[in-house]
Image (tube, rainbow, N blue to C red):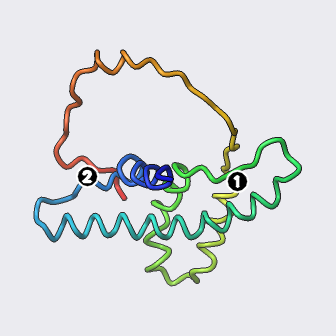
Amino acid sequence: MRWSVDFFYDELKNKIKAEHFSGYSQNSILQDFYAALSISNVQSLIVGDINDELASESKDNEYQSKVNTNLSYGFLKNRIIALFFSDKDMSIITEELRTLFKKHTIPIRPNRKYEGDVSKYRKRTKPKVLKNKKDAM
C-alpha cells in the first residue's frame, strides 16, 4: 500500500532534487520546495493521461508501457518557463510535451525480482554532501 508514496519520495528527492535549495533563508527554501511540487504536479497531470492512453493501446503487446519519468522531468524542465510565461498558446507547448513523453516510454515488466548484494552497502563510505548544488530547474 505504501509503494506509491515511496516512489513519490524517490521522485522528489532523486529526480527533482527537492532537497537541494538555492538559498539558506526560510523563504528561499519554501519557494524552491513549492516550485518542485508544482513541477511534479504538472508532470503527473500530463503523464497520467498518457499512461492511461498507453494502457489502452498496449493490450495486444507483450508488455504494457509507461512514460519514462526521468526523461519527462528533463523535457519539462526545459519548457516549464515557456509553458507559463510565453506568448505562445499553452496547448501548443503541452501537445509538444505530450508527443515527447509518448515517444519515450519504458515497458512494465511484471514479477521482476532482483537479488541484491546486501553486504556491498556496508563497505560504502558516507556520501559527501555538497552545499547548494542543484540542477538548473
Give the residue at x 58% y 83%: 89
x and y, in percent, of residue 53 in the image: 75, 64
Which amino acid, by three-letter code, is at mark 2? His
x and y, in percent, of residue 17 in the image: 34, 51
Q: Residue 118 appears in which quarter of the rendering?
A: top left
Q: Secondary structure at mark 1?
A: helix
x and y, in percent, of residue 80 in the image: 46, 68
Instruction: Determine the CA span between mark 2 and mark 1.
Output: 30 Å
Query: Which residue is tagged 1?
Result: 103
x and y, in percent, of residue 75 in the image: 53, 57
Seen in the picture, residue 115 relative to 9 is either above or below; the reply is above
Dot 2 crowding, Cα within 10 Å, few <14, some 14–19, many 20+: some
Front residue of 47/87: it is 47
Give the residue at x 53% y 65%: 44
Which amino acid, by three-letter code, is at mark 1? Lys
Give residue 20's mark: 2
